[in-house]
Amino acid sequence: MRTVFLALLVAAPAFLTQPAAAAPCGGDFGAFLQAMEAEAIAAGTPPAAAAEFFAGARQDPAVLKADRSQGVFRKTFLDFSQSLISKGRLNTARAKSAELDRIFARAEAEYGVSRGVLLAFWAFETDFGQVQGDFNTRNALLTLAHDCRRPELFQPQVLAAAQLHALDEFDLGTTGAWAGEIGMVQMLPKDILQRGVDGDGDGLILLKTSPADAILSGARMLQYHGWRAGEPWLTEVTLPEGFDWSLTGLETERPTADWAALGVQPRSGALPDLPASILLPQGRKGPAFLVYPNYRVFFEWNKSFIYVTTAAYFSTRIEGAQPYLAGNPDPALALEKMMALQEKLAALGHDVGKVDGILGAGTRAAVQKEQVRLGLPADGWPTPALLDAL
């Protein structure tokens, strides 16, 4: 049924597979549901399935509250990684690798994605399927699609969920994360519809209950976003005394041979022949990594620098890497000081994005540029000295 339905969607005229115009956000929720139902039908969902999907849907205030109160990514890399990575979780990941060896081998053979990466996402997203979220997914998606903050992101997810419902792959009682992600690896409906894999051969793609479906769907999604088969993503390294800190950060990429010539050494093994950047998630006094093109693909799964770096590091641990050298980094700025720093950086013309106290990629790059200008160690890690100097 799924193959036939998707074939019909592909064969349909463009006006059937793409909504003519987005439903207006805000306003009366009932009118919004009617507009979205019409869009779903225009996008190819059978009218009976669309009517069933939208009937009885409601707004969920808890979803909006969660959307406006994210704070976990204000943690430092050391705090975040140590809270998510334990000996027990590492042992469970390796046990799952052995238990589902055939599935992971298939993911590696067909999509080129390492099992360590897939296991890390599975662990972080749902603790290997144990905690998949208890928000009603239909209501969550419709709430966010109706909200005027990001309707362009969530209205297509509503349409995809309606199409999954028509395929018998989305029950109206489906639960997941507040932002609409579903299943063991927490994928959004549009990704499931377009890149989901029936890993267990039962004719359905059910990421909530089938490890094979979840693992292979995650692998296919990463491949779609540019994962390069057989290549690493992160290596812990040591840096020499007197290293030029301004060369660190994701904006500077050089061949590993160039880094080796500057004294950058892997803690174990040899460096691959790849373009790489030096990453100091907590400044020059903390752990140091070389990251490669595959590291950047992690951001297609989650946009948080801290989440991505922790997942990339945990992936290497699952595959046998040793624990990082934590070092003794300078303490992180308190929230109010970080926000004050972002305001100063923005006033100087830097694009730091939203002033939210989160040390994201934009803020790190701005910090490093100001450190260079002021003659401070340019490692991208904000300190009280930098704040005072600004």
Image (cartoon, grey):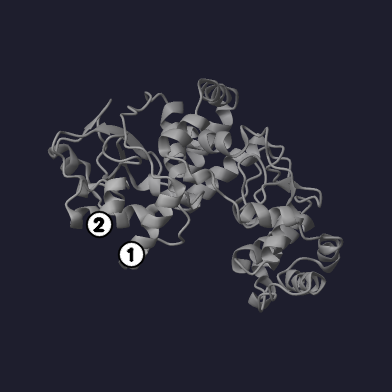
Q: Is residue 389 left or right of residue 38?
A: left
Q: Quadrant of residue 101?
A: top right
Q: Which residue appears at 64% of the width and 63% of the height?
A: 154
Q: Amino acid at mark 1?
A: His
Q: Quadrant of the N terminus?
A: bottom right
Q: In x, y percent, where is residue 14?
A: 63, 75
Q: Amino acid at mark 2?
A: Glu
Q: Which residue is mark 1?
A: 350
Would you say the residues marked 1 and 2 are in contact, meaning their CB atoms lie under 8 Å apart?
A: yes
Q: Which residue appears at 74% of the width and 57% of the height?
A: 61
In the depicted structure, whether residue 278 falls above or below residue 179: above
Q: Residues within 10 Å of mark 1 (few under 14, many from 20)?
A: some
Q: Which residue appears at 66% of the width and 69% of the height?
A: 11
Q: Is residue 359 visible?
A: no
Depth order, front residue of 291/229:
291
Q: Is residue 160 left or right of residue 108?
A: right
Depth order, front residue of 262/349:
349
Q: Is residue 6 left or right of residue 150?
A: right
Q: Quadrant of the C terminus?
A: bottom left
Q: In the rendered structure, find residue 370 and report the number of the disc placed on it.
A: 2
Q: In x, y percent, where is residue 233?
A: 37, 40
Residue sitting at the far front: 388
Mark 1 and mark 2: Cα distance apart in space: 10 Å
Q: In x, y percent, where is residue 218?
A: 56, 44
Q: Is residue 41 visible?
A: yes
Q: Quadrant of residue 242?
A: top left
